[in-house]
Image (tube, rainbow, N blue to C red):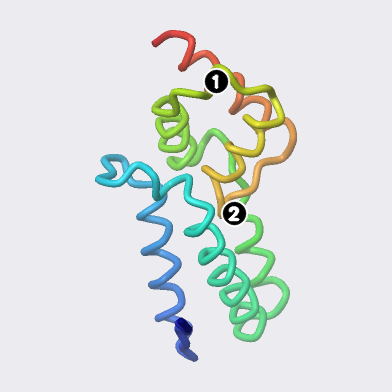
C-alpha cells in the first residue's frame, strides 16, 4: 500500500499543520490516543520538515527561525496545559522511571520542543497532578 500526499501550495501545507496541531492539542478530544500517537508524530514530522523548507524558500533563514522559535514549548503556551491533561489520563505515568516519562512527554508535546529545564518542570507538574488523583 502506498499513500502520498503532495502539495506545492504553502497555505495548504499550513492548513495541514494547523489541522494536526488541533488534533493533538484539543481541549476536549474524542480520541485520547491521537495526542500521544507515534504514527501521528511521524506524519507531523514530515509536515514540519516540509513546512520549514517552504518557509526557508519563502522568507529565508529568518522565516525558518521564527517557526523554530515558535515550536519551543514553555509553560505560557496553551498546549502546555493540554499536554498535562493528556499525562493526567495516563494510568501508568506514576509507575514509570524518569526516562520513560521524558520520552512520553516529548511524544505528547511534539511538534513542540522542550529544553531540559522545561522538560523537568513539565514532569514535576505532571507528577504532582497524577499524585493528587
Q: Residue at x 44, y 28 (%)?
A: 90
Q: Identify the secondary structure beneath mark 2.
A: loop
Q: What secondary structure is marked by label 1?
A: helix
The residue pinned by badge 1 equals 125
Disc 2 crowd rating (10 Å Cα; few below 14, some 14-19, many 20+) is some
Residue farthest front in this picture: 1
Q: Position of residue 96 (x, y in %)?
A: 61, 23
Estimate the x, y position of residue 121 in percent, counting from the top left.
Answer: 64, 25
Of residues 120 and 87, the one drawn nearer to the viewer in this rendering? 87
When the figure is inspected, residue 8 is found, relative to residue 42, above or below; the finding is below
Q: Position of residue 78 (x, y in %)?
A: 43, 40
Q: Residue at x 59, y 43 (%)?
A: 73
Q: Residue at x 36, y 55 (%)?
A: 22
Quadrant (top left, top right, bottom left, bottom right) of the C terminus: top left
Alpha carbon of mark 2 to alpha carbon of mark 1: how far? 20 Å
The image's mark for residue 71 is 2
Can you say whether 56 is above or below 25 in the image? below
Residue 122 quadrant: top right
Q: Between residue 110 and residue 71, name the one nearer to us.
A: 110
The tally of labels here is 2
Looking at this view, is 70 or 24 the one in front? 24
Q: Residues within 10 Å of mark 1 (few under 14, many from 20)?
A: some
Q: Report the side of 33 relative to 41 (left or right).
A: left
The residue most toward the bottom is 8
**Marking on residue 59:** none
Q: Is 114 placed above or below 100 here?
A: below
25 left or right, relative to 96: left
**Badge 2 vs badge 1, beta-carbon distance below 8 Å:** no
Foreground tag (2 vs 1): 1
Amino acid at each position: 500500500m502506498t499513500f502520498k500526499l503532495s502539495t506545492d501550495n504553502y497555505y495548504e501545507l499550513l492548513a495541514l499543520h494547523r489541522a494536526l496541531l488541533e488534533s493533538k492539542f484539543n481541549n476536549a478530544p474524542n480520541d485520547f490516543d491521537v495526542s500521544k500517537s507515534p504514527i501521528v508524530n511521524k506524519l507531523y514530522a514530515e509536515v514540519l520538515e516540509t513546512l520549514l523548507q517552504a518557509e526557508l524558500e519563502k522568507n529565508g533563514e529568518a522565516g525558518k527561525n521564527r517557526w523554530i522559535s515558535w515550536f519551543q514549548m514553555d509553560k505560557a503556551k496553551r498546549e502546555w496545559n493540554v499536554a498535562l491533561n493528556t499525562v493526567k489520563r495516563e494510568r501508568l505515568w506514576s509507575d514509570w522511571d524518569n526516562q520513560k516519562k521524558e520520552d512520553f512527554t516529548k511524544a505528547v508535546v511534539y511538534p513542540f520542543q522542550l529544553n531540559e529545564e522545561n522538560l523537568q518542570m513539565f514532569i514535576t507538574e505532571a507528577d504532582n497532578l497524577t499524585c493528587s488523583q
